[in-house]
Image: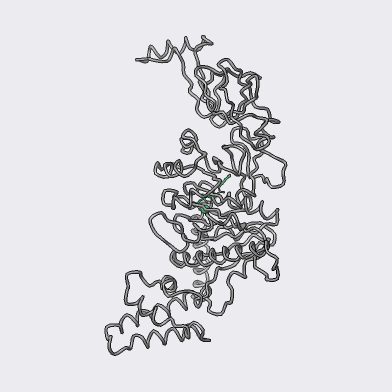
Amino acid sequence: MIIGFVIGESKPTSISAQTSRPLAVGEYIIIDSEENRLLGLVEKTIVSSAALTDVHNYDEAVESKEIADINSRDKSFTTKIMILGSLSSLKKGVVVIPAIPPFPGTPILEASKKDLESVFNPSNSSWSKIGTLLRNPQIELKININKIVTRHFGILAMTGMGKSNLVAIIAKEIAKLNGTLIIFDYHNDYDNLNIKKMNVMDAKINPRLLDANTLADVLEIRENADVQQRILRLALTQNVKESKEFWDELYKQVEFVGANPERKEDRHSADRVCDKIDDARHRFADILDPDIIDPISLIKEFRINILNISEFSEKQANVVLAYYLQELLTDKKLSTITKNSKNKRKKYRFNSPVFVIIEEAHVFIPKFEDTHAKYWASKIAREGRKFGLGIGIVSQRPRNIDSNVLSQIGSFAIMKIIQEDDQRQIAYAVESISKDLISQLTSLNVGDAVLVGQCVNLPTLIHIDEAKEKIIGSDPNAVEEWKKMMLFNNTTMDSRELVNKDLLL
Ligand SMILES: Nc1ncnc2c1ncn2[C@@H]1O[C@H](COP(=O)(O)OP(=O)(O)OP(=O)(O)O)[C@@H](O)[C@H]1O
Ligand SMILES: [Mg+2]
């Protein structure tokens, strides 16, 4: 059905059109040019009325409205459309932009369900459904899982807009494909996902495997506490690392270093280090385990692995993440090299691709700070593709994420973002996002997203499915919870009063 015509100046990548109805931003249309049917995306729509322009007072507005109502030519719907490419090539996942722009007068058609399905809902097995097109909800939207795993994925949005929900949907899809996923769960968001054979575990660190600087981070010794840092460095000897009772030996060694008669001033700092060892060893007994041989061995191949890091401080979580990322990359590198060589005898932990999702990426991969986790995440972003190791980064503060890592990411799902600094960072890091799409980000609702990059054939506005069983991240209903607590308190108070009365009688 014809819904409009190309007008004014056309370019190979964009046209303007006048249409019979206002087209919604994000809607897909067909530009029916003679040689080629082109798929277009509505980027901007301006609705105006000739009679109601330049109106200066109320009476004039009333009269102009009457004129506007009876004059069918009064309203104009001017639309800016981005040309996405020839429909026939997009079906094959190839973008071919016309050499000659569509001529003014070329008809604009509604895109049919069949046209859209062929582009957004490929039947190839590497594509998985995560939602529906925002403006064409009858069309299911699939993403190419291969591309997010090998070319990395970013999920960026303000808080509460649906990032973790999307992670949950992706986890469910990867589970269906028997893939290996590791989620570093900083907020205990994922342990109740309804996924068969999900592997939920506490991340663990073996303190023996750490160098002195990293151990200082884990023990929460401040960076500027130079004397404490030095004492720990001297105390963490190879003997201590190899001793049966790691913590006791480390404690003794710190006392020994602090008792140096030539440096009496060290005594106090050594006592502080001993306190910190005591504190960490008791507070983090479950996660700092000197007897665990290989923390990575807890992760299972072909499973959704939820690594709980919610008990850790930021610094400790950083150490955990760095350790796991380093081990994963080393393992994947060696297993790939071995796979390609004749010597296939040695077994590695992971012999197939692994996808790792890092929440709170602005904390672990910060822009203006060099952390261990950032070092290994950047390395995976640069080299992971070759070895089948992908990262997914999730953040509500894109402006604080390291730009180099962002620029290595092949695909993004971007939800509502209001802050201009965040939008600027996205515009800078994400090649395939246009200014007009960026300006849409403020108006998205919960669960809506702009998908760009290699995981989709085209930049796409979608609504993500809701992981129904998931109660993660939902806002607490404060009023209901207070009401329940009040009822509960009243009932227990009443029964206590009854008991007291009984006792008095
Ligand atoms: N696609 C969706 N459809 C409907 N509701 C959704 C959708 N995505 C998220 N929600 C709802 O919005 C709320 C917040 O979602 P979610 O926890 O995924 O946000 P978030 O971006 O991860 O937040 P945070 O920054 O706090 O981690 C949840 O209650 C969830 O049920
Ligand atoms: Mg979340």
Q: Is residue 263 visible?
A: yes
**Depicted 49 relative to depicted 360: above or below:** above
* In the displayed structure image, the side of residue 352 where residue 22 appears, left or right: left
| Percent position of residue 295, x then y | 58, 71
Q: Quadrant of residue 199?
A: bottom right
Front position in the image: 10 or 344: 344
Residue 505 seen in the current view? no
Q: Where's residue 475, x and y in %?
A: 51, 51
- Residue 267 position in % (x across, y down): 31, 84
The residue sitting at 67% across, 57% down in the picture is 179
Q: Is residue 361 above or below residue 313?
A: above
Instruction: Name the residue nearer the viewer: 216 or 337.
Output: 337
Residue 51 position within the rendered picture, expressed as x and y whole percent measured from the top left: 44, 12
Judge by depth and name the residue closer to the eye, 483 or 439.
439
Rendered residue at 58%/18% (across/down): 4
Q: Is residue 61 left or right of residue 444?
A: left
Q: For residue 271, which quarter of the picture?
A: bottom left
- Count of all numbered marks drawn on residues in the image: 0
Quadrant in which the N terminus is drawn: top right
- Farthest residue, direction front: 342
Colour basis:
one colour
